[in-house]
Image: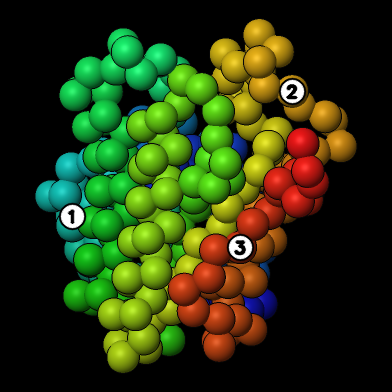
Amino acid sequence: MQFQDKVAIISGGSGGIGRAVALRLAAEGARLVLVGRHADKLAPVADAARQAGAPEVWASVCDVAVEAQVAATVAGTLQRFGRLDVVVNDAGQMDFKPLRELTTDDWLRALQVDLFGAFYFIKQAFLHMKPGGSIVNISSIHAVETEALVAPYAASKAALNSLTRSAAIEGKPLGIRVNSVLPGAIDTPMLWDNPNVKSGVEKIDKADVGRPEDIADAVAYLASDRAAFVQGIEMRVDGGRLGRLA
C-alpha cells in the first residue's frame, strides 16, 4: 500500500489513461481527487476507484484551461484532505486539421489544455505541496516523432516535456519531483477515433498497442517513493515502437 494516507489529484480522470491511473493508485490506498469537465463522466470512475480500494474520492468538476478553477480544485483538496502528495496531469486536447486550416483559436485550445493546464497544477503544487511530493505529466510520443494533422497537440506535448525539465529543476530544492511519461499507441478512444488511424495514414500494428494499465504502472512508479532519485525524466512507454528504424 505505497500510497496509503497520500492524496493524489488526477486531471483527465474520467476515462482512458486517467481512469487506469485512478484505479492503480486507489488499489495502493490513495485518496483521490478526480478532475474533469463533466460530473456524469467522473461519477462511475469515482465509484470504481472506491471499489478498487480508495478510502475517499472527490470528483472535482474543473476545466484545467481555467487557472481559477485549478486553484479552486487544489484549495478544495486541501480543505477536504489536508494535504497533497501527487499530481498527475493527464488532461489532453487533440484535434485533427492540416496546418493551412488551423486558426489561432485551435492552437490556443490545445495549448490551454495540454500545456497551461499542467502548468496551473504544477504552480499550485509548488505553492502547497510539502517535500516528498511528486508530479507526473502525461506527455506523448508525438512530442518526439509525429504525423500530419496534429501539429498543435504535438507542439504542446513537446512544450510539456520542456516544462517538465524546468519544473524538475525548480522543484528539487522544494523536495518535489517532476517527471513525464510518453505513451505510445494506447488502447483508448483517443487512438481509435484518430482520423489518421481510421484512414490508414498511420499504421498501427496490434503488437504496438498498449493498455492504459501499462501507463498507470509507470505513473505509479514515478509517483512513489521507489522513484525518490528520479527527477526530470521522460519515460517512454510505447512497446519499443519508436526504437525501430522505419
Residue under numbered circle 2: 203
Which-is-in-front pick, marks 2 and 3? Answer: 2
Q: Earlier in the sequence, mark 2 or mark 1?
A: 1
User: Residue at the location (66% across, 77% down)?
Assistant: 1
186, 62: nearer the viewer = 186
Q: Earlier in the sequence, mark 2 or mark 3?
A: 2
Q: Quadrant of residue 141?
A: top right
Which-is-in-front pick, marks 2 and 1? Answer: 2
Q: Is residue 216 visible?
A: no
- SS category of the residue bearing label 3: strand
Residue under numbered circle 3: 235
Q: Earlier in the sequence, mark 3 or mark 1?
A: 1
Q: From the top left corner, tell me how far across and down residue 88 is, in percent.
A: 45, 59
Mark 3 crowdedness (10 Å alpha carbons): few <14, some 14-19, many ≥20:
some
Q: Pointer 3 and pointer 1: residues touching (CB < 8 Å)? A: no
Q: Is residue 244 visible?
A: yes
- SS category of the residue bearing label 1: helix
For the residues labelled 2 and 3, the Cα–Cα distance comes to 23 Å
For the residues labelled 3 and 1, the Cα–Cα distance comes to 30 Å
On the rendered structure, is 166 left or right of 105?
right
User: Residue at the location (23% across, 66% down)?
Assistant: 124
For the residues labelled 2 and 1, the Cα–Cα distance comes to 42 Å
211, 237: nearer the viewer = 237
66, 53: nearer the viewer = 66
Q: Quadrant of residue 209?
A: top right
Specify the farthest residue to the front. Answer: 245
Residue under numbered circle 1: 72
Q: Pointer 2 and pointer 1: residues touching (CB < 8 Å)? A: no
Q: Amino acid at mark 3?
A: Met
On the rendered structure, is 99 left or right of 141?
left
